[in-house]
Amino acid sequence: MNRPRRLDERAPMTVRLTLLCAAARTERAVRFADDALDERALRRAEAAAGTLPQAGIVFTAPSRRCTGTAETLGWDVVTAQPALRDLDMGSWSGRTLDEIAATDASGLASWLTDPQAAPHGGESVEQICDRVAVWLDALPSDAGRVLAVVEQAVARAAVVHALGAPHQAFWRIDVPPLSTVELTARNGRWNLRMAELPLSPRPPA
């Protein structure tokens, strides 16, 4: 027989966090720079506006591409979060992967394999994973539905933390521009949530 729940026995609350990876310029070369979005990227962001869930709290990283994505989506009240900033690339900022590979191949190799490496003098993968983990765990349990426009590196770090995966898994997570990551937290534990496709009506028999 189930005993009645006392008034002070409240059910644990669930935080439902949707991370939207910011739109990106349509250049083929990967450049470590915070460039403003081009027209094609803005149009793609506009097309995604109606696909996102409603949320009581909306955050964005402070970069131009993240704030530009949020503005294009038409969100009115958005709070910039410094903790969601992109990976600090130090002396590699503004350069492409090809340029770095040509001038610092060993440094690039160590950065892509060792989470503690920061050959550019900026931030290591381990450091961004720790930073994002602290931000996630600081979200109040009564936050409810939360949306955040983030950098690809931040989305990767969030998945690493939610799964309790080693930091080496960071580079094995692919988060394309304007894709979403769904996370839920209950009793201090994060879970990765796969989105469901809307069901189509069954054809008549």
Image (cartoon, rainbow, N blue to C red):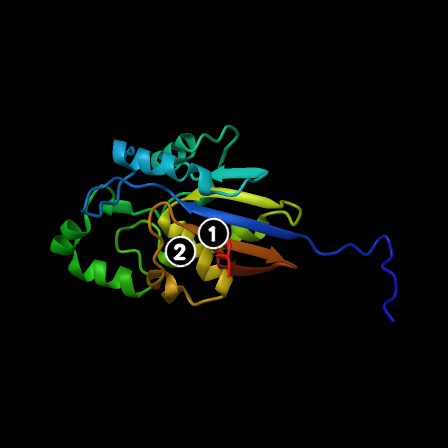
Identify the disc placed on residue 156. Answer: 2
Secondary element under disc 2, as helix, strand or loop, is: helix
Query: Above or below — where is 49 with respect to 4?
Result: above
Identified by mark 1, the residue type is: Val
Task: Report crowding for label 1: few under 14, some 14 to 19, many 20 or more residues within 10 A (C-alpha).
Answer: many
Residue 81: x, y in percent? 48, 39
Query: Gap in Å between the C-alphas at discs 1 and 2?
Result: 10 Å
Q: Is residue 187 left or right of residue 152?
A: right
Binning the other alpha carbons within 10 Å of mark 2 as few (below 14), some (14 to 19) or many (20 upward) gives: many
Of residues 80 and 127, the one nearer the viewer is: 80
The outermost residue toward the bottom is: 1
Q: Is residue 71 something one can see in this rendering?
A: yes
Residue of label 1: 132
Number of marks in picture: 2
Of labels 1 and 2, earlier in sequence is 1
- In the rendered image of this protein, does residue 61 appear above or below residue 105? above
User: Where 59 sits versus 17, above or below?
Assistant: above
Please state the horizontal and vertical placement of residue 187, each as a whole percent of the image.
66, 59
In the orientation shown, which residue stands out farthest toward the top? Answer: 76
- Residue 80 vs residue 38, the one in the foreground: 38
Rendered location of residue 110, percent (x, y):
25, 63
Q: Amino acid at mark 2?
A: Arg
* Residue 124 position within the rendered picture, expressed as x and y whole percent measured from the top left: 35, 55
Q: Residue at x 54, y 61 (%)?
A: 191
| Residue shown at the point (35%, 34%) measured from the top left | 64
Residue at 41% in and 43% down = 85
Whether residue 81 is visible, yes or no, is: no
The residue depicted at 57 percent of the width and 50 percent of the height is 16
From this view, report whether residue 47 is shown above or below residue 14. Answer: above
Q: Specify the farthest residue to the left.
A: 102
